[in-house]
Image: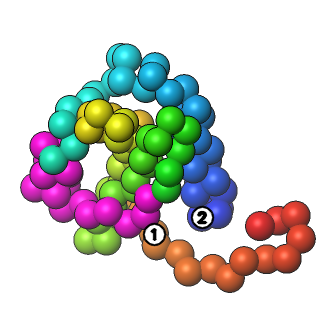
């Protein structure tokens, strides 16, 4: 179940990253520093992981181990950060990679 939740979250993030310039349209966006501060002060979230997507967009996962809340964001090269998804029951996993098609 945990693995499925992570796959869905990362799949959604990838779809948003592939959208490129359309990411900021109709989303909650703002300057990266302001959004990161808000996630920290209001939800106690800090960056847990990140990756580089299409058009040099940076996808980041912020989460709080205390409250279990999480937020996926995308930051465009111009410094605007948009909220992509958020939820509850975040768990950090340290799983070994499987050999074969399940990885």
Relative side of 45 to 7, left or right = left
**SS label for mark 1:** loop
Q: Decide: is 20 above or below 65.
A: above
Viewer-nearest residue: 100 or 52: 52
**Residue 11 image point, x, y percent:** 62, 44
Q: Which residue is mark 2?
A: 2
Viewer-nearest residue: 2 or 7: 7
What residue is rendered at 32% in x and 62% in y? Answer: 47
Q: Which residue is mark 1?
A: 91
Asked if marks 1 and 2 touch (Cβ < 8 Å), the reply is: yes
Q: Decide: is 3 above or below 73.
A: below
**Residue 86 image point, x, y percent:** 38, 44
Relative side of 57 to 40, left or right = right
Asked if residue 103 lies in the magenta stretch, the reply is no
Hey, which quadrant is residue 23 in on the image? top left
What residue is rendered at 18% in x and 37% in y? Answer: 31
- Magenta highlight range: 34-50
């Amino acid at each position: 179940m945990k693995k499925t939740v992570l796959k869905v979250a990362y799949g959604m993030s990838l779809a948003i990253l592939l959208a490129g310039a359309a990411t900021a349209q109709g989303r909650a966006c703002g300057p990266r520093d302001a959004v990161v501060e808000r996630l920290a002060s209001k939800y106690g979230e800090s960056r847990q992981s990140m990756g580089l997507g299409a058009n040099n967009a940076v996808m980041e996962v912020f989460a709080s181990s205390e409250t279990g809340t999480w937020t996926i964001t995308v930051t465009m090269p111009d410094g605007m950060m948009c909220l992509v998804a958020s939820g509850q029951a975040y768990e950090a996993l340290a799983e070994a990679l499987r050999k074969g098609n399940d990885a």
